[in-house]
Image (cartoon, helix red, strand yellow):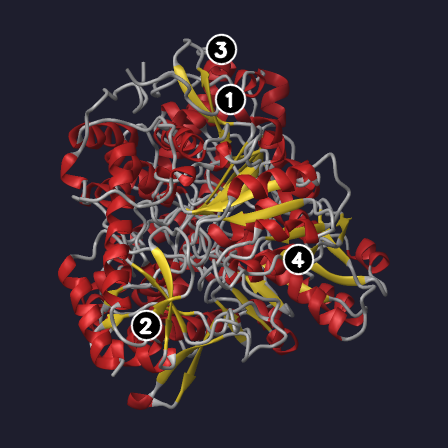
Amino acid sequence: MPFIPHNKTDIKEMLGTIKAGSIDDLFDEIPKNLLIDQLKEVPQALSEMEITRLMRKRSLLDEKLLCFTGAGAYDHHIPAVVWDIATRGEFYSAYTPYQAEASQGTLQTIYEYQTMMANLTGLDVSNASMYDGASSVAEAILMAVRANRNSDSRKVLFVSGVNCTYQKVVTTICQGQGLTFDRLPLDIDTGKTNVDELSEYDQSPVAVVIQHPSFFGTLENVDAITDWAHEMGALVIAATNPISLTLLKPPGEWGKNGADICCGEGQPLGIPLSYGGPYFGFITCKKEFLRQIPGRLVGCTTDQKGRRSFTLTLQAREQHIRRSKATSNICTNQGLMVTAATIYMSLLGFKGLRSVAQKSHEQTFKLIQQLTSINGIKTIFSGPYFHEVAIKLDHPVDYVLEQLALRNILGGYDLTSDFPQLKNSLLVCVTETKTDEDITIFAEAMKEIMI
Amino acid sequence: MTELIFEKSRKGRAAYAQYPQFSSDTGIPEEFLRHSNPVLPEVSELQVVRHFTLLSQKNFSIDTHFYPLGSCTMKYNPRVCNQIAMMPGFADKHPLSFENHSQGFLSSMYELQDMLKAITGMQAISLAPMAGAQGEFAGVAMIRAYHVNRGEKNRNEIIVPDAAHGTNPATAIMCGCKVLELSTKEDGDIDIDVLKNMVGKNTAGIMLTNPSTLGVFERNIMEIADIVHKAGGLLYYDGANLNAILGKVRPGDMGFDVIHLNLHKTFSTPHGGGGPGSGVIGVGDCLKPFMPIPIIGKRGTGKKARYRWLAEKDLPKSIGRLSGFMGNAGVLIRAYVYMRLLGANGMKRIAEFATLNANYLQSRLKNVGFELAFPNRRATHEFIITLKNEQKEFSINAMDFAKSLLDYGFHAPTIYFPLLISECLLIEPTETETKETIDSFVDAMAQILDNAKTKNTNHKEAPFNMPVNRVDELQAARNLDLTYKEIIE
């Protein structure tokens, strides 16, 4: 009986206390016709040894290719300390910190996380996290709709380079809220939004979502777009990559007044790629919008002896108190992932995170140099970028990717289905984990394939 | 006094082993670059290890303490589940990996879908929702999509029992529906007569938990299903309490059209200090076309079987995607491993022993003088006691009991939920606890009550032996301090 400690004596004594004849008696309130005898089609139990062997075989069956794909999930090095400590039982098997006195470890960690994310994004306040980057954009939009006192509009505008999957998720999560969505056209030469054409857009959205770096890795004119959005009475939502914020101007400093809400995918901060999850999303904002922020918040206070302590606060925004009037139905935060990210950010600090960013960018530059020296490969967009670049191939992309896979390389993201106007285009990404040799291997492989 | 990581920082200190070496400057034009330095820690690697290790030691956790939180199912999290999920072949895989390099993972997920079908008695499963609340969202959105698809846009009323978990009404509103609250009777069942008058041509559906949040089995479930179905509505099952009936009853057999399960409850994936969860959903035939994507599909059989993602092209009527990729893959792997360790017989025993432990604890607490909310009902995997008499006679309430229990080394049960029962404790021991642990919990409860009667301790100021005393939550809300603002010297 895996994990069940009862022996025959225990069972007998417990039934005696309950005054029941058998365990079956305890189910006597359930209509008999609902009780099943056996779970059919569920296999019999395996021992730990057997399941470990099975899963090891399966994990080895799936080769890890040399990864040059980004597109929302990034192959960064995760220091050994991060998960060694995050999987300590006291973090791993702890519950949501509703009883503050029994949860100071988790609560202080979240408070430190909130501080780091607010600082990194250049805004005032952070929550304790959301499920992932995509859903954090949806929640940021719903928050902006609640918070924007200057607008009755139900229209939301995406600039051109927002991740298409993020937009799909927003559509799913915001259905039933009466919102409509517009998207600014992509300038095919620069890979970003053309700020000279902004004045052609004549709607007044309640919020403008700027992904920066864009999905293509290109850098938007965030100041101009932010100021334009604010002039229209819209709130500005920045969707960013946290590693990029060590190099690039943070959303709190965009334009004259700064972006209002910042969100994005926290996976680059020490979270394994793990087939897409669990990751975590983050949301930070200016302090005037704080009461509209979804999710958990940890505050610093004192205990009865005046000692510094931490507790969940402003819980009246959340579902367990406000129920149908809550800011969101969200219950969980991604506690374990936040713990890991906080340890990661503590270990690296600003300089360390920036060196990860710089190394990733440097290696991307090297790869692009080598690739564009091959016949049949060109970069598509002019202009500055951060650690991801879209390249055009004169062979079909799916063929190229198959050939790269045969050479043990995961060569990038095929842009064709998301952006049909960019035929035969591939989004490649290099992180600090790729050495000069790795880059040469990729380039040599492409040379062979492009012949 | 506890120090923040920022206070332990010193300018120029770093964990240099973690810094990649780079040589050139970025070539990014000035106007894009950051010039401000955000305050992040500057500490050594040893400082990081000590800081977070010491912090962890301030927590209660299942690994260290009995945690009878009702509705949360705080059972043992088997270590091997984590070890397997962190195998490099799973943990290091990019979500956009090729399908034919992901067969080990995809086959495990397909088998997980099948096992969940068998357990729930539903026709199809989607593993996409990342938490219970997202599962609820998917469920209600599918119900809406179903009605709209049949030309019945007017059906936008969701019926929710007054004892429901807060996510239920919050979810219904998020889906653009109206919430109608259904009352519960004294014996713990919902009021059928009220329900009969509530359903009509605008009914989209009803959201139920069974066993209910009151810790008792909804005995009239078949009649409820009949009433709602006849009125044209669908039934949604909140699977938070599945631990009580796993392997004994299937939600599909009770008439539910859509369910969500909390893998971080029933299937023992880690609570992690507040996540990650996983809120997989199961549907009956009528809702299959609307399931959130992606789903794992299979072609061929036996050794020739190939597994693949089913997405927009395969489910054109899907309510859509809920996440950037496929959901909480690592959590799903942990749940899969857990289920393979239990097998069919192991799963049935969960319900049996969770129920045995709960009924035993209920009887013992009654025997030492506590009042049960439903004295004439069987406990399911959880039950409620009310402290309203203790509050009246001895001025000790549910909060005081909760805080006092911490000093005895027990995490408190769920307090003040469900809202219907005043000064309540919702208690769920789970099946992985020994009789001795349960007995010592009873002893602690009896002692706390005794101390209140004889005025031996000031329970209003408990706890006394924790890293901090009772925390001032009022001050936390009044003087909001959500980020540390001092500079590192």
Q: Which quarter of the figure is the N terminus of chain A placed in?
A: bottom left
Same chain for the residues under marks 2 and 3 in the image: no
**Vertical position of residue A137 compared to residue B60: above or below:** below
What's the CA distance linking mark 1 and mark 4? Answer: 53 Å
Q: Is residue B184 left or right of residue B269?
A: right
Residue A369: image x %, image y %? 25, 61
- Which residue is depicted at the point 46% across and 51% down? A132
* Mark 4 neighbour class, 10 Å CA radius: few under 14, some 14 to 19, many 20 or more: some
The residue type indicated by label 3 comes to Lys
Q: In front here: B360 or B186? A: B186
Labels 2 and 3 touching (C-beta < 8 A): no
Q: Which mark is residue B455?
A: 3
Which residue in the protein does label 4 denote?
A182
Q: Nearer the viewer, mark 4 or mark 3?
A: 4
The chain that hosts pointer 1 is B
Quarter location, residue A434: bottom left
Rounded to the nearest angstrom, the CA distance separating label 2 from label 3 is 82 Å
Classify residue A144 by image quadrant: top right
Specify the amino acid type for callout 2: Ile
